[in-house]
Image (tube, grey):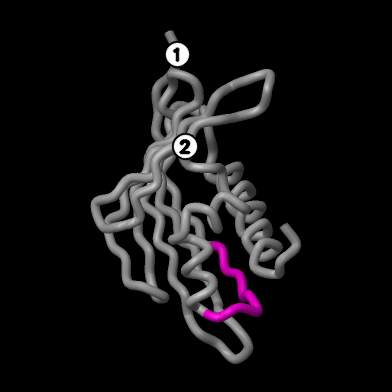
Amino acid sequence: MNERFVNHATFVVERTYAASPERVYQAWSNQEAKAKWFSKADIFDFQVGGREYSSGGPPEGPVFVFDAVYQEIVPQRRIVYTYTLDSGDTRISVSITTIELIEVEGGTTLIFTEQGAFFDGHDTPEVREHGTNELLDALGKSLAGEV
């Protein structure tokens, strides 16, 4: 019998981008802009109660499914969504994510906070935080026009 357990964790990642809060917000709220640095969504309905859904992965497997619902949106200031992440037929986590955008001299500070429940060792907060760092680096490259 496989052991069942839940690892609850919160992590915070901050980035400052040389872009206005409007541009950073647009990189999250516009499907084409987001697809430059995040997975291309199969469903993208950016509004409170709207859904974002994407699936994909490396050619040799597994397929990851990201399924999010937007809980709160304050344009140019805050985005809050809940999401599940599945690997194949296995639910590996459920999270709430808050994106805060703060105007600073010369750009925007983005504060990404994720509070997650990670199931049965299929994923860990450390792996998720590492992936989030990579995504936010890709966002920075996209904002700088490098992608």
Say what secondary structure mark 1 lies in. Answer: loop
Q: Is residue 19 magenta?
A: yes
Residue closer to the observer: 48 or 109: 48
Quadrant assignment for the N terminus: top left
Q: Residue at x 63, y 88 (%)?
A: 106
Query: Residue 2 bears which disc, if any?
Result: 1
In screen coordinates, is 23 left or right of 6? right
Q: Residue furthest front?
A: 32
> Could you say where residue 49 lies in the image, as x and y percent from the top left?
24, 51
Residue under numbered circle 2:
54
State the CA–CA distance, disc 1 to disc 2.
29 Å
The kind of residue tagged 1 is Asn
Q: Residues within 10 Å of mark 2 (few under 14, many from 20)?
A: some
**Sequence-first disc among 1 and 2:** 1
Viewer-side label of 1, 2: 2
Q: Which quadrant of the figure has residue 144?
A: bottom right
- Residue 42 place in picture, x, y as percent: 45, 37
135 left or right of 46? right
Q: The residue tagged with tag 2: helix, strand or loop? A: strand
Q: Position of residue 3 (x, y in %)?
A: 43, 18
Q: Magenta part mainly helix, strand or loop?
A: strand
Direction top: furthest residue = 1
Residue lying furthest right: 146
**Which image quarter: residue 85?**
top left
User: Which portion, as a residue range, is magenta?
Assistant: 13-20
Is 129 included in the stretch rendered in magenta?
A: no
Q: Amino acid at mark 2?
A: Ser
Q: Position of residue 12 (x, y in %)?
A: 51, 62
